[in-house]
Amino acid sequence: MKPHPHTLAAGLPTLTWLQFLTSLVDWMLLVFLQLMVFQLTGSAFNIMLLVLCELVPMLLLGAWAGAIVDRMKLNRVLFWSCAARLLVSFALLVQVVRGELGALYVIAALGAACNRFFSPAASALLPRMASESALQRANALIMGVRMGGMAAGTVLAGVLASRYSLDLVAILIGVLLLLAGVCCLLLPAVVHTPSTDPEQGILDDLREAIARFGGVSLVPLAASVLVTLALGSFEILALVYVSQVLGRTSSDVGLLFGAYGLGMLGGLLLSSWRGAMPRYGQVMVASLFLMCLSTWALAQIDSLMLALVLVTMAGVAEGLVLSLSLLRLYTSVPNAYCARVVALLDTATAASFLLAVLVTGAVADIVPATALLEYMSWIFASLLLLGIGASRVGTRRRASNLGAKEAGDA
């Protein structure tokens, strides 16, 4: 029996809480593992390896997991993802495991693997629950809640670990995952309407999604990749920029991240504006140019206040792009294909983030921060102009082919 639309809409608060709880867990676990690895090794290189252990499952499982999720009941996927993470989190309470570097890497990889199934399932559930008129606001709310979970998770884990113990952090992670599992059980049932033949293979599912929706997904995917390239570079450069260019203590990097997060929230708020989607192309181009301009301007100043303003502007632009890109997929791709397309987006952004981290990390000690920021801004602007040009050429070709076809039919 198909659930009534009001029943599905009533599940939105539960889905919102679920997203907040899992985001809280994600970042608490990240801080926990980084603290453990640093205590064992005292090496930033090992921290980088930990990040790689979390990114590799995104690259290997991302698209494949999305195709599997589209074949299954979303509620079940969400529940069993949380249940599997809860089992993994029990290992955090075992002292022998916490003393083994390899075991911590495995925990990070397993947690990320569970997330590869959770993320596309949660994303595919949202357009099924929210009405067309409410989807834009609901999407901005969910993304804002996840950012709030990120901020709260990092602060909470740091405070509890410094004032109490890592055991308390591990216990709280388990409790939060139990609450997330309860939220999964409280979600209203969603009718499962798979789009593919059960006999069809997973790779065939992915090929079908790309063939049918690759065109409408190209712009949001390319824009999101450009933003995550900038975000990955910012993660590495922020500390160097604060000390080299601004002449401040390393602890002031928190101000930059805070300003960036505030800007991202502003961008998410702007993405809920009703006029954003009808002007999708103009808003995306303006936001990406603002990101490039802010990056270039950061290289020209040495004032903390101006840097905070520019970083906030970049955060607004990137928040707008990420939110509208996801919203574009929700409104362009049928629900039965949504998990696959979102998973492909996640895989592409994970690959671009990893590339940015590795490349920026390799040259940050060689190239001055100001020069690197200028190079980045010109590279991003060039990629943006190239993308705009390619998009216009593609539009003209499609219009020309359509005209030729109509003329032939006549």
Image: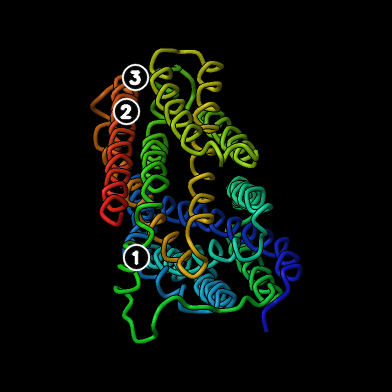
- Residue drawn at (29%, 57%) of the image: 409
Q: How many marks?
A: 3
Q: Residue furthest bottom?
A: 199
The residue tagged with tag 1: helix, strand or loop? Answer: helix
Residue 382: which quarter of the image?
top left
**Closer to us: 93 or 4:** 4
Residue that carries the numbered disc 1 in the rendered image = 102
Q: Earlier in the sequence, mark 2 or mark 3?
A: 3
- Residue drawn at (32%, 21%) of the image: 374
Tell me which amino acid carries mark 3. Answer: Thr
Residue 21 versus residue 272 in the image, above or below: below
Q: Earlier in the sequence, mark 1 or mark 2?
A: 1
Left-right relation of 368 to 332: left
Residue 335 versus residue 356 in the image, above or below: below
- Residue drawn at (50%, 64%) of the image: 334
**Closer to us: 265 or 155:** 265
Q: Nearer the viewer, mark 2 or mark 3?
A: 2
Q: Nearer the viewer, mark 1 or mark 2?
A: 2
The residue tagged with tag 3: helix, strand or loop? Answer: helix
Residue that carries the numbered disc 2 in the rendered image = 376
Residue that carries the numbered disc 3 in the rendered image = 370
